[in-house]
């Protein structure tokens, strides 16, 4: 039954999906909202998800599309102003531990490269799956990953973390 | 080199995020509500479409055109005004008034 199937899928993937969204750049609350909305959208057409060759790729595709369109909406909501408002930013004062270093390094990547890194090295999608999720050619996935890995290898925070600096 | 570390680094970074249980029942409830709303909208749209098509078909069926009544015209000439009355009016409108009604009207 699709209800049980969906419940089982969500129970198994919820934590990983929320953490993926956090690594993509969402706050914790945003990540839970994003994943919940993406999963609800999948549930609306669960038959299609079940029929898909790769459920994880399908769900990640919905998640990434919603994440990107959410960021796009936020961008269009911005208004120019003469004085800069007080900005809300992630708290990086908690100390230089590996998590902060990783998050700072990810923050410095362009969004397409960051998405590629999270999908490949956290969600463990193959390059073929990533090409399907991101709706780009496999070569594009490879080049994004290559550029991202090069940037991360040169990142001072990660270099410090690896003890190479 | 970095590639071999990335998975571990990302997993450690992800683990720092404490994730609560998935709101599965809430998701089911919201999707059920959305499906019902969507079905209601579909039924309403279908009924509206059927009503529009049916109404148009009824209006256009042969012999269904209503008789067009001639537009109202101004009343005909008042004809002969009785001797003890006279026409009183303003612009194109006039009434026949008797002597008692005319007592206050300047001649």
Image (cartoon, helix red, strand yellow):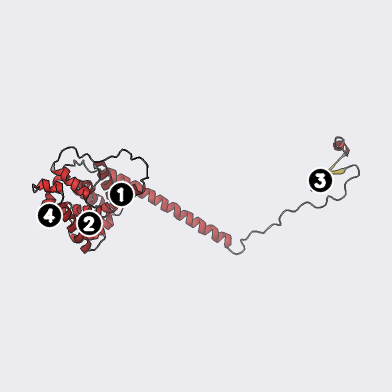
**Distance from label 4 to label 2 (Cα)?**
22 Å
- Foreground mark, 3 or 1, reads 1
Query: Residue A24, percent across and down?
Result: 23, 49
Which residue position holds label 3?
A: B94
User: Which quarter of the picture shows residue A60?
Assistant: bottom left
Q: For the residue labelled by badge 4, is the local secondary structure a helix, a strand or a loop? A: helix
> Which of the chains bears the disc numbered 4?
B
The tag earlier along the polypeptide, 4 or 3, is 4
**Residue A82 visible in this rendered orientation of the protein:** yes
Closer-to-camera residue (B48/A27)? A27
In the rendered structure, the answer to whether residue A10 lies left or right of residue A83 reads left
Same chain for labels 2 and 1? Say yes or no.
yes
- Residue A57 marker: 2
Q: Are marks 3 and 1 in contact (CB under 8 Å)?
A: no
- Determine the CA span between mark 2 and mark 1: 21 Å
Is the residue A148 above or below the residue A32 in the image? Answer: below
Residue closest to the far left: A163
**Cα separation between marks 3 and 2:** 86 Å
Q: Are marks 4 and 3 on the same chain?
A: yes
Q: Both on one chain, marks 4 and 1?
A: no
Tell me the crowding category of disc 3: few under 14, some 14 to 19, or many 20 or more residues within 10 angstroms, Cα based: few
Task: Please tell me if label 3 and label 1 are on a single chain.
Answer: no
């Amino acid at each position: 039954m699709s209800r049980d199937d969906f419940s089982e899928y969500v129970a198994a993937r919820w934590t990983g999906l929320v953490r993926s969204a956090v690594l993509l750049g969402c706050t914790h609350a945003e990540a839970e909202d994003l994943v919940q909305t993406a999963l609800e959208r999948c549930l609306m057409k669960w038959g299609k998800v079940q029929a898909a060759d790769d459920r994880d790729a399908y769900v990640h595709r919905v998640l990434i599309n919603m994440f990107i369109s959410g960021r796009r909406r936020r961008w269009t909501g911005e208004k120019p102003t003469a004085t800069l408002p007080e900005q809300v930013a992630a708290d990086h004062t908690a100390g230089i531990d590996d998590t902060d270093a990783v998050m700072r390094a990810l923050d410095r990547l362009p969004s397409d490269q960051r998405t590629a890194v999270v999908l490949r090295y956290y969600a463990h999608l193959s390059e073929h799956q990533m090409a399907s999720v991101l709706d780009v050619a496999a070569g594009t996935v490879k080049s994004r990953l290559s550029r991202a890995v090069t940037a991360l290898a040169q990142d001072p925070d990660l270099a410090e973390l690896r003890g190479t600096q | 080199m970095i590639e071999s570390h990335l998975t571990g680094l990302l997993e450690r970074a992800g683990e720092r995020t404490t994730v609560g249980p998935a709101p599965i029942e809430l998701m089911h409830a919201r999707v059920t509500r959305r499906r019902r709303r969507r079905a209601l909208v579909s039924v309403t749209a279908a009924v509206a479409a059927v009503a529009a098509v049916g109404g148009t078909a009824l209006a256009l069926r042969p012999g269904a055109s209503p008789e067009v009544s001639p537009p109202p015209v101004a009343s005909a000439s008042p004809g002969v005004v009785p001797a003890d009355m006279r026409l009183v009016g303003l612009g194109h409108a006039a009434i026949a008034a008797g002597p008692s009604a005319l007592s206050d009207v300047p001649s």
